[in-house]
Image: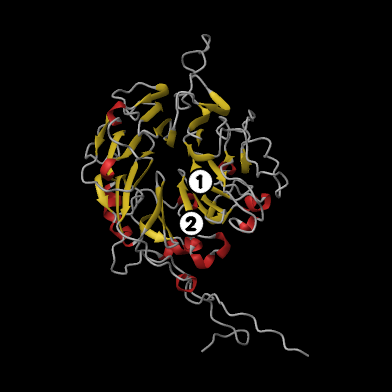
Amino acid sequence: MPPKGKKGAQSAAPPVLPAAIPRDGKVYSEVFAWGKSDVGQLGLGEAVMLAEKVTTPTAVEDLSYLHIKQIGAGPEHTLVATTTGEMYSTGAPDSGKLGHKQAEIDIMDDAFSTVAPKYKCCHSFREINALMECNRAGVEGDFRDVACGPEFSCCTMTGGHVYTWGDGASGKLGHQDNNNKKLPTKISALREKKVPANRPACGFDHILMVTASAEYGEVGKEFGVTISGGLPMAMGANDAGQLGLGDQSGRPQWTPQMLDPKLRSNVEGSVDAKAGSNMFPGPVTMLAAGQSFSLALAAGTVWSWGTGNAGQLGVPKPPDDPKRPSFIPQRIHCHLPAHITTLRSVKYIAAGQQFAVALCDNSSVFAWGANDKGQLGLGDEKERPEPVKVEALEDKKVSQVALGQSHALALIEGGKVMAWGSAQGGQLGTGATKNTNSPEEVSGLSDMQSIAAAGNVSWAWRNLCAAPAKKRKAEAAAAGADEPTTKKRAPKKKK
């Protein structure tokens, strides 16, 4: 019986809750997590969250029923994108970085702890309702990249759109303000400037990304442009030059800005970006960001900008001012990209809080920057202002590196994992809680396909089989959602 009110009125649909991890009886992946678990960032349940740390790799059973595309790790939250078009999150919900509505959080008593020491935290993965396929435009495509900062989140779509949410201080979310966003919000400025983007990297308070290669009428068709890929952009805080724009005023940027000044005025496609940029020796293929510094990889070369107080820029420090009082720290800020000339044939880069690592084509690993916890893996705790080869990894055939706040992971031959640096949260996975300044193998892991790290947490995972068939849009929709139609419109009758 319809409720009282206007004639023909329908009862309001109940709030749609993010679905629990689907269990179709088939295991698709193996996902392991370890390290700090005090706010549920590992998604291992309330008991583990209250234990506050996990010192050895522990299987995240819920995620085994998903086919993993990418894991985005933050110090206090984690994002998981699947190949079937879902996005899940877990951890601390403050600032809105999990992407759930407050009403959803209040209802999900099974996933959110009420006895957390700080606040109500999510201790198991739940799908982000706002990013379900039924709530997104079809032209956006599927999830491409996910990335996390300390208090914010970012994902890009195959169609070139970018979503950000969480803490918006310094305008780092790109929404032309400095407000928090409780739900994933598309960066409208990119659409207005006709610039599709991908490959994001999240620093402490800034975000880097590059243009997505687009052909008019094909990839990125909603943007209506032809643009070359790999043109770097940046937004957010700029007090130390971490945006690489050459601006020494320290003003933050509330929308993505091209690093190349020739392309920076690209409003509504007014600048022909088809020819690319000569700012770097080629398209930027990878970005990395730490606390107030940034890295870019282009044609095998590495470039850095931002603060270099701990040597994290990888270039020689300028002479210290002899008149500087000893109680005032030396401040080194680089406002434009600087070439790290000692690095060649690099294929992968990563940034921690105040240190960085580069992986070369021959699998050699170089590290530089802060080293107070042994995070450079060089056998000591001495800072390095320029890249130094990590000899302990020379014969390990490293294929990937991942850095947390002060620890590092390396994926080596056989899908095994090695770790070094800070161990205070158990993030090395070796069972130790004392720091180690040389790489050690994490036991119990093999055949891993990828790794991730952030803060004091670590991840390793592999898919066990081919991806399942992707859900139709109607199947992914919440109850009562309109089902997409493929029927053609009937022709008009002739008079």
Q: Along the line of sight, which residue is nearer the eye, 493 or 89?
A: 493
Give residue 21's position: percent from left, percent from top. Answer: 35, 64
From the viewer's perspective, is 102 left or right of 469? right
Q: Determine the CA span between mark 1 and mark 2.
A: 11 Å
- Residue occupying image coordinates x 48% and y 71%: 477
Q: Along the line of sight, which residue is nearer the eye, 278 or 186?
A: 278
- Sequence-wise, which precedes: disc 1 or disc 2? 2
Q: Which mark is residue 388?
A: none
Give residue 466's position: percent from left, percent from top. Answer: 34, 61
Q: Amino acid at mark 2?
A: Phe
From the viewer's perspective, is 479 left or right of 177? left
| Image quadrant where one finds the C terminus | bottom right
| Residue contact at pointers 1 and 2, CB within 8 angstroms | no
Per the image, label 2 sits on a secondary structure element best described as strand
- Residue occupying image coordinates x 62% and y 34%: 278
Q: Residue furthest right?
A: 495
Give residue 47's position: percent from left, percent from top. Answer: 26, 54
Q: Residues within 10 Å of mark 2 (few under 14, many from 20)?
A: many
Q: Residues within 10 Å of mark 1 (few under 14, many from 20)?
A: many
Q: Which mark is residue 199?
A: 1
Q: Amino acid at mark 1?
A: Arg
- Against 129, residue 414 (above or below) is above
Which residue matches tag 2?
143
Per the image, label 1 sits on a secondary structure element best described as strand
